[in-house]
Image (tube, rainbow, N blue to C red):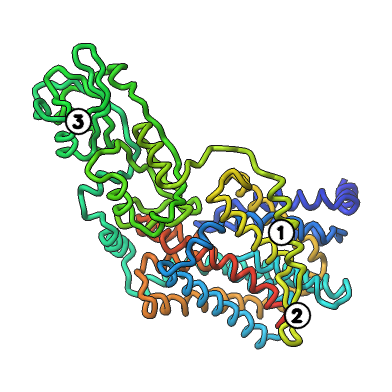
Amino acid sequence: MIDFFVHALRADPEIAVFLAIGLGVLVGRIQIGSFHLGSVAGALLMGLIIGQVGLEVPHELKSVFFVLFIYAVGFKSGPEFFGCLNRGSLKLVLFSVVLCATALGAILLMNAIYHFDAGFTAGLGAGALTDTAIMGTASSAIAQLGLDDAAKNQLYSHMAVAYAITYVFGTVGLVVFVGTIAPKLLGVDLRTSARELELELGIASQEEMTSIPYTRIVVRAHLLSDSAAQGMTVSALEHLHPSITIERVVRDATVHERDPGMLLKQGDIVGVYALREDVGQLGQWLGAEIDHPEALSFPTRSADIVLTNTAFAGKTVHDIRAALVGSSRLGCFIDSITRQGLALPLLPNTVLHKGDVIAITGRTSSVTMLAAQLGRVRERSYKSDIAVHSLGMVLGALLGMVSAHIGMIPIELGVGGGVLLVALLIGWYNSRHPEFGALPPAAQWAFSEFGLTAFGAVVGLLAGPPAIAAMQNEGVALLISGVVVTLLPPLVSLYFGRYVLRLHPMVLFGALAGAQTEAASMNKIIEQSGSNTPVIGFTVCYAISNVLLAVCGPIIVYIAS
């Protein structure tokens, strides 16, 4: 039975690829405390184990899967990457540049000390920084070296070994550093610091808090009885209670649509929008709650609006609301604001960027009007424009093959760099013209997750039996180097960001996680602080570092070889 299975793996290597992916994902889910390997590291580990039987896996598979991953990363990061190239985001861009430059310097320093080859050095960078894109672009660069196939295969094997050895500490070390060590080094209490930033962002204003709720709105009908609302106009009542809007009044069996100047009388039945946290007070403000279909059936709509209007990009939520609303009530409430799929804090002074998604619920006419002014409604489509994305990958691959020279040094993007650049452009253009190049978030996740996991599996399988010997020879040196490369860049960047750039600690911690493209450490900060404010620093640095770290792959290979 075992012989049959081994023969099947050798005869049909695609079985081995999918076996490594499946087992790797399962292994990656295993929790040890708060740590788990993750799909990519799990697949690479399973690939290393399965590859010991000796397999002939096509090298081209590695490139195909990496292209899927890097294209999805570029498409997702495009709007934020180009949107953050302005003065308002200059500090965060500079922060990412410093961290990536320090990381590259640390990698090359370890290479100089231990005399690693290009494979070990690239794998060290990818694992210690938990950025598999380095390994992908480095693979493309290794393929261009003037070496025979045996020598290239050895470099690929060494790269997989170095990644496997350094990845665990790269993940755990960064989470511990950002979540525990960094706050202690700066003497920061996370919850206190988060409250301070929220105060700076406007949470101290009670009126703003009720206008920008943390929970979804609800619809209620109330019978006006002996309450203060009698004799007041609709607009006066709404001014007294900013967390409600009167959308419909039923009087003597006649339905009256919203009229801010209408005088309310005893016996009126009002249909209202209200914030969930104030529902308990509606009876006191208005009268008894009743079930009245006519009062409750006013038109309502929820929509995700993508901010594309340049006039509002770089403005705070408060400024945008004031410019759009003025003195009249729109009957709309913000449910959430997300950037690259991450929730931003719903606070008045939160600055919005192009490409941010604002989820709004409210009066149908007002939602439609807001969408036209802010940008566009993001349609809930499940269809991807396969033609555009396939041709985009072709164009990126061709662009990556174009080379130039600076003196005697050949310069080229490589397939990974070319595809990343084209994907950035297509993602940015799609954010403004959604009819071109649709790629829904679920499809982006599938491209990215499957592409990267499969890439890790193939890299592990290609490493083969020589991986064990490489671990024995260089294991200790790689462990030591991995610790240095994991901790030195965030340590230098921490003090640079705090004392040179003067970033707020919560923004700084989010920027640390984003600049190393590691969401787990940001989630740790959010969990410990009870605040989403670190997302402000995360997204810009994540977009910039995804590009810069990918570019580091060919540089590492060129210098190390």
Instruction: Determine the secondary structure under disc 3.
Output: helix
Q: Earlier in the sequence, mark 3 or mark 2?
A: 3
Q: Residues within 10 Å of mark 3 (few under 14, many from 20)?
A: some
Distance between mark 3 and mark 2 Cα atoms: 72 Å
Q: Earlier in the sequence, mark 2 or mark 1?
A: 1
Q: Quadrant of the N terminus?
A: top right
* Residue 373's disc number: none
Distance between mark 2 and mark 1 Cα atoms: 23 Å
- Horizontal placement of 36 versus 400: left or right? left
Position of residue 75 relative to residue 360, above or below, is: below
Counting from the top left corner in percent of width and height, residue 323 is at 30, 50
The residue singled out by tag 2 in the image is 410
- Horizontal placement of 283 versus 163: left or right? left
Position of residue 442 relative to residue 43, above or below, is: above
Viewer-nearest of labels 3 and 2?
Answer: 2
For image coordinates 42% across by 79% down, the residue present is 496
The answer to whether residue 42 is seen in the rendering is no
CB under 8 Å between discs 3 and 2: no
The residue singled out by tag 1 in the image is 66
Could you tell me the amino acid type at mark 2?
Pro
Q: Residues within 10 Å of mark 1 (few under 14, many from 20)?
A: many
Q: Earlier in the sequence, mark 1 or mark 3?
A: 1
Q: Quadrant of residue 28?
A: bottom right
The residue singled out by tag 3 in the image is 282
